[in-house]
Amino acid sequence: MARSYDLFVPGRVCLFGEHSDWAGGHRRVNSAILPGQVIIAGTNQGAYARVKAHPDSLVVHSTLPDGTRPPPCVLPMQPEILRREAGTGGFYSYAAGVALFIREHYPVGGLEIDNYRTTLPVRKGLSSSACFCVLVARAFSKVYDLKMPVQAEMEAAYQGEILTPSRCGRMDQGCAFGQVPVLMTFDADSIRTRQLSVGRHVPLLIADLKGQKNTVRILGELNRAYPFAESALAQGVQRCLGEFNTAIVERARRAVEEGDVAAVGRLMTEAQAAFDAHVMPACPSELTAPKLHQVLADPKVRQLVYGGKGVGSQGDGCVQFVTRGEAERRRLRAYLARRYGLDSFDLDLRPAPLVRKALIPVAGFGTRMFPASKAVRKAFFPVVTPDGMAKPVILAVIEEAVAAGIQEVGIVVRPGDERVFDDFFTQPPLQEHDGRLSDAHRRYWHEVQRLAERITYIVQEEQAGLGHAVFCAREWVGNEPVLVMLGDHLYRSDTDVPCARQLMDIYESGGGRSVVGVCEADLADVSSYGIVAGRRSGERPGWIDVREFAEKPSREYAAANLATPGLGEGRFLCVYGQYVLAPAVFAHLARQVEGDAGEAGEIQLTTALESLRQAEGVLAYRVAGRHYDTGLPLPYVRTLQAFSRPRRRPPSAHAAKARPRRAARPRQDRPR
Ligand code: UTP
């Protein structure tokens, strides 16, 4: 049976910078115009669908926001038929347009889409058509594993939509990023996108003004100010959508990222005032927008909000507000309904949940350290830290987690081992022994006992692999992200920021995508590791969008498929044992646990990561730091020496970045 995928694509709202997207396009002709900049956000509402392969046709079942189901479309995947359907402008023309574009550029067969639920209102400036086009592009990408990054989905959605009579902008497809704010820059024909982090929850309310607006006329009139401003009015329009817009979008970006909700609201009011002063006179018939201005000026409304402005092309379409809190949002919704008869809906910008928990699996057999691992659990092998303290590996791993800001630690152990670990952390040293300890040892021991308060033990009944060990902790982790650290690896940062913290920061500013720490490996070694193929994400320096995970690939496969641009010849990225995982990973592990287990009956974390990547994207990051293996005899010897040496501090943070790092040895997996 064909595998099916569940998808959700939201609509999008333009929070700041509307009209500057097409204005920036005029740079093709007049380079004095500034690039357009907008901040958009995915809506809480959108289209839900289950999708799977179809042998030869595009089959779409749709559901309208009111729950009605129009008759489905069934179109053979033949170019002339798809083109004809796209050209009709009918209900399924968007699906046909995108399917045609995909068919012409990728090796695909048919597709079945069951859009079983739609919560996004149509024709309200929320890009419902782009939402659907992105849904179709993503469906093809998932079902045929096309590994399309978000930008490629956006491109396919755009190219598909313009095959229909509908005219859309390049901003609309930003909904492909999901329910996160995105900064988009429009420079002639090029578009750059950057996902923003959210410092604090921004509760917005969007209300449908139920007025008239003619977007075609608005665009027609405003376009007269381009490409060259030949009147004072046109200069005002260009300045407002140019310099002023660039400045206000930058201030809004900072306010969103710093969590200054009041400033986000104030900036909306400021943006509206500038628009009214400089852009409205260019199309007064549409932009005077009496309903919009009546609601924005209402004293009762102003008590409940930090600010607000029109949505999309402006006019009397929709209005958006930054409310002062949840309670104020509820009161505003009720007031707008009662006083003006308006329908409204919530839009939330939410920070990615903070990473509070670390999971350390130590339940493996430690075959490669046999027979030492028979005498002593591998997690208790000693290492020496630069301060001269000899401690078990598990303690050094927990200390790295706590230094990174972790509050709770889960340790996955073999049945019966809870007691062994708990004794270590909670039982005082023998009395005779205690008398011989130095003050430094006693103080340190006191700290260790306090760590015990953070620890929970999770039992892995059978040793079915690292993925299975992580899966065993699903209830303890709950619906939160989790830092996973291998119990036989140590980490040391090259900077003042612990390696784990570096990954956690990326998770928290990456909109909740999972992050894997990676280092480099030679082609000769790839078949021993989990290998990551990626490309620079373009969102932030150092972020890598994972394009494929492969567990211990053959050299031939790696050479042909897993190269990451920017690495030296024959070099590859491999996972080394630190991950920040979104809670969605458990659904992917469950699929492996319930289905047939992977290679040698083991549940591989890398396999679940590949399926998580296909569903929601995963980031990779080369941390500024090193890792040390204690799970293999010779690397353990090297670790003992290297880990005890004090960290060589870089002369400055800048120098730390510039200094070429020696590639650390990646994790050696169990030989088969
Ligand atoms: P390894 O793959 O190194 O396995 O696990 P291992 O059992 O420790 O060592 P070998 O391969 O037999 O020599 C990486 C981490 O995952 C844990 C291990 O304890 C180690 O910390 N692990 C592995 C589990 O907790 N459960 C498992 O079933 C497998």
Image (spheres, rainbow, N blue to C red):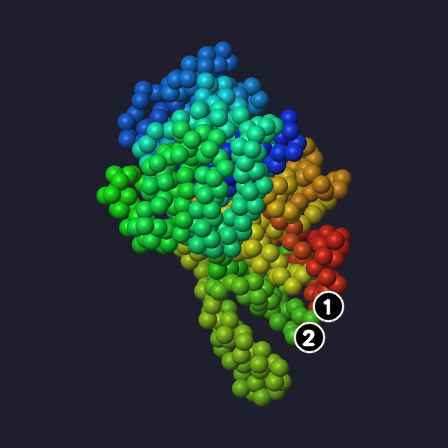
Q: Indicate the quadrant containing the N terminus: top left, top right, bottom left or bottom right.
A: top left
Residue 209 at what x, y percent from top left?
A: 33, 36
Q: Is mark 1 within 8 Å of ligand 1?
A: no
- Pointer 1 residue: 645
Residue in the picture at 36% in, 24% down: 61
Would you place residue 467 above or below residue 610 in this image?
Answer: below
Would you place residue 291 above or below residue 92 in this image?
Answer: below
Instruction: Give 582 or 213, whichever is nearer the viewer.
Output: 213
Instruction: Give 419 or 299, whichever is nearer the viewer.
Output: 299
Instruction: Give 370 or 93, whichever is nearer the viewer.
Output: 93
Which of pointers 1 and 2 lies earlier in the amino acid sequence?
A: 2
**Residue 624 can be seen, yes or no:** yes
Instruction: Give 393 or 290, whichever is nearer the viewer.
Output: 290
| Disc ID at residue 384 | none
Horizontal placement of 31 versus 305: left or right? right
Residue 170 at what x, y percent from top left?
A: 52, 30
**Residue 374 can be seen, yes or no:** no
Residue in the picture at 36% in, 40% down: 293
Residue in the picture at 54% in, 83% down: 430
Specify the quadrant of the image occupied by residue 628.
bottom right
Instruction: Residue type at mark 2: give it.
Output: Gly
Would you place residue 470 above or below residue 389 in this image?
Answer: above
Instruction: Residue type at mark 1: give it.
Output: Arg
| Disc ID at residue 388 | 2
Horizontal placement of 212 versus 645: left or right? left
SS category of the residue bearing label 1:
loop
For mark 2, does the 10 Å Cα neighbourhood hold few (<14), some (14 to 19), or many (20 or more) residues?
A: few
Residue 111 at what x, y percent from top left?
A: 45, 23
